[in-house]
Image (tube, grey):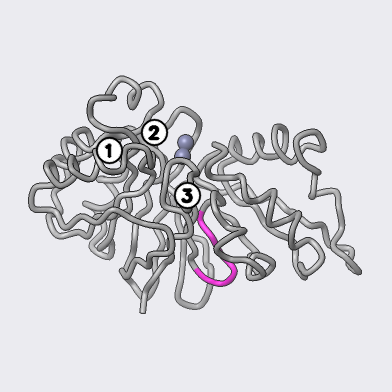
Amino acid sequence: MNEITILGAYGTKGEDVGTSAFYIDEKNVLDAGNLLIPLKERSADIENIWLSHSHLDHIIDIAYILDSYFVSRKKPLKVLGLPQTLQVVKEDFLNDRVWPDFSKITLIDSDLKCVEYEEIEFHKRYTLSDDTTIEAYKTDHTVPSCGYIITRKEKSVVVSSDTYSLDTTIEQIDSRDDINTLVVECSFPSRMEKLAYDSKHLTPKLLFQKLKAMKREKIDIYINHIKPLFLEEMTEEINRFKGDYKVKILEDGEKIIF
Ligand SMILES: [Zn+2]
Ligand SMILES: [Zn+2]
């Protein structure tokens, strides 16, 4: 079965809600907003973190899984992302001032470093396992950002991550029949359209307006990155604006089958 698990579904942390993270398989996660608590000791087995961008709600648990499971790690943790994203992680986060620079620290009883970095390129397919690949495409946020297409057994899910424009996401969906599922962000209620524009996020109204440009009609849509404070208001709006689309608002721990 093709599935990914939502480790964190929301746009900010709150009581029992985590920020963006997707469990692809036992070695790979997309974003690191919420790894430590849902994965516990399985955090030590994660080998690759595929980052969409450098905002804190997508990177924070890199720090905590390294700190908490340092002793049980057998292999380096590889942090993958756009060059600009990795630059921020190195210079502004794991920099020996905010948190240790784990790329200088070796694993216990090993010459290998705790962290390695790898820059990714748009539209290059990276192999995760015998049947799974991942590919990045450019999105539209306040910092350089990418969405990801995860393909398993010739079926794919697109994760837009944080974005204001959906043009490139729709371009991917309309050009690839293998994509059957879209995970798209929606952060603020529609009355906060200016804040959404300034912070390069979507509202329910903007989301479904923009999706009108998509030619594909049959696609499962999952919404993430809602700010929990507005959950009730935005749920009502999503139901009002969704039209004929099959839409589900994601929760932590949920699995997406694609
Ligand atoms: Zn962001
Ligand atoms: Zn975010």
Residue located at (25% from left, 63% from top): 180
Q: Which residues are magenta?
A: 25-30
Magenta span main SS: strand
The residue that label 1 is drawn on is 167
| Labels 3 & 1 near each other (Cβ < 8 A) | no
Say whether disc 2 or disc 3 marks the residue closer to the N-terminus.
3
Q: Is residue 62 above or below residue 69?
A: above
Residue 29 lies left or right of residue 184; in this view the side is right
Three-letter amino acid code of the residue under disc 1: Asp
The residue that label 2 is drawn on is 140
Residue 95 lies left or right of residue 52; in this view the side is right
Residue located at (35% from left, 22% from top): 195
Dot 1 falls on a residue whose secondary structure is helix
Q: Of the numbered discs in the image, which one, if any, rests on residue 20? A: 3
Residue reaching furthest to the left? 244
Whether the residue carrying mark 3 lies under 8 Å from ligand 2 is answered with yes
Three-letter amino acid code of the residue under disc 3: Ser
Q: How many marks?
A: 3
> Which quarter of the picture shows residue 38?
bottom right
